[in-house]
Image (cartoon, rainbow, N blue to C red):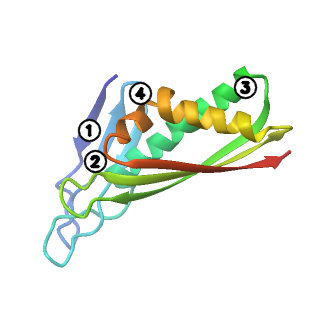
Amino acid sequence: MEAVVTWTGPALNERGSDMQFVVQTGSGHVIAMDGAPSDAAGVPGGRNLAPRPMEVVLAGTGGCTAYDVVTILKRGRHAVDRCDVTLTAERATTDPKVFTAIHFHFVIVGKGLRSEVVERAITLSHDKLCSASVMLAKTATLTHSFEIRET
């Protein structure tokens, strides 16, 4: 796997903020990243035009586990029509500001889905299959909840 991150600065705006980056992924896709505007202490920032790098990490983790859960349910021949995951994270207050807690709330929509089947799929993803979740569990407490909605 490969990714190339390119700083697009110094395209300074009136505040001197120039922390925009473009990522070219190994699969040929592009992701923009940016920082919050400069703070009062003079810490360089961006223009708030794209997600922060750590937001991309969190989003990638949600995508990774959702992919697993849908795959597990479909392989089990369960009628799943939709899977939404809302991630809520806390970070350390000092550098490095790693994730310290992440809660995943799944909304699974389908026909005749049983609670124990959905729970098993989520647990299997978090404990064994989702590389991002397993990696982040080294610094963060991962919790989850879910609801099932009938199609």
Which label is found at residue 5? Answer: 1
The amino acid marked with disc number 3 is: Lys
Q: CA distance from mark 2 to mark 4?
A: 16 Å
Q: Residue at x 63, y 32 (%)?
A: 121
User: Is residue 45 found left or right of 144 in the rendered image?
Assistant: left
| Rendered position, 147 above or below 69 | below
| Rendered position, 134 above or below 109 | above
Q: Earlier in the sequence, mark 2 or mark 4?
A: 2
Q: Are marks 1 and 4 in contact (CB under 8 Å)?
A: no
Q: Earlier in the sequence, mark 1 or mark 3?
A: 1
Q: Earlier in the sequence, mark 4 or mark 3?
A: 4
Front-most of 138 and 22? Answer: 138
Q: Earlier in the sequence, mark 1 or mark 4?
A: 1
Badge 3 is on which residue? 74
Badge 2 is on which residue? 21
Q: CA distance from mark 1 to mark 2?
A: 6 Å
Residue 36 shows in this picture: yes
Front-most of 15 and 69? Answer: 69
